[in-house]
Image (cartoon, grey):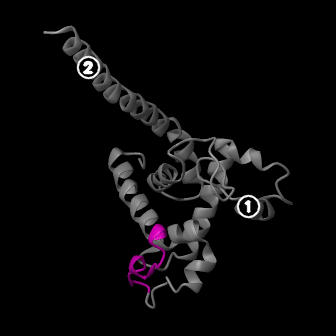
Amino acid sequence: MSRLKKSILAIFALCVTAAVSIPLHYYMQFKEREKSFDSLIIQTAKRHEIEPSLIKALIRRESKFKDNVRGRHGEYGLMQVTPIAADDWMRLNRSGKFQNYSQLMKPEINLEIGTWYLAHAMRRWKDYKQQKTLALAQYNAGPGNVVKKKWVPSHKDGDALNLITFPTTKAYIQYILEYEKHYRKEGINK
């Protein structure tokens, strides 16, 4: 075999190795992050009477378990909590407003506020068969859109998902509900 062919094969082998090992490295990092917040998720979810599998699936969608991310619209942390939601939480549970929104990057604070907000939405839609769908729509698109856009079924056991007119919100909900099943099967709710 010529020296050129050997060099090409060596370069090809390096490229294949890199193509396999780099994604594998990121996958392993993700799997580590995915489990790192389980005990905090379980504690917080139980305190707010929500299934931990739902919170974990929401975190997967919102931040891929990265606690230091900022959203395009100013959201913070694991659950992509907005300053408005944080101030609502402060008003209802303590007093005043947040002095420093960077505190929302702390997993304990972020999970508390995000889970509180989702629990509030779950209670709002508790009489509906698709309670989770409506609560997740509210979490993603805001309570005003759920009502103004007429995403609430006319009867309590109606199909809310098909009423949602924002394709991104519909995909968001489907993603979370799919992973909620996955995490439930893994046993996080026990």
Q: Residue at x 55, y 53 (%)?
A: 45
Q: Residue at x 50, y 45 (%)?
A: 64
Residue 114, given in percent of the width and then of the height, sits at 62, 56
Q: Is residue 7 left or right of residue 105?
A: left
Q: Quadrant of the N terminus?
A: top left
| Residue 132 visible | no
Residue type at numbered disc 1? Trp
Q: Look at the numbered disc 1 and give the secondary structure of its residue.
A: helix
Give the quarter of the image for residue 21: top left
Residue 97, given in percent of the width and then of the height, sits at 84, 58
Q: Nearer the viewer, mark 1 or mark 2?
A: 2
Give the quarter of the image for residue 181: bottom left
Task: Kindly identify which residue carries mark 1.
Answer: 89
- Closer-to-camera residue (7/19): 7
Answer whether residue 168 is magenta in the image: yes
What is the number of the mark on residue 33? none
Q: Residue at x 36, y 30 (%)?
A: 24
Answer whether residue 9 is magenta in the image: no
Q: Residue at x 26, y 20 (%)?
A: 13
Q: Residues within 10 Å of mark 1 (few under 14, many from 20)?
A: many
- Closer-to-camera residue (12/120): 12
Q: Residues within 10 Å of mark 2 (few under 14, many from 20)?
A: few
Residue type at numbered disc 2? Ala
Q: Which residues are magenta?
A: 156-169
Task: Kindly identify which residue carries mark 2.
Answer: 13
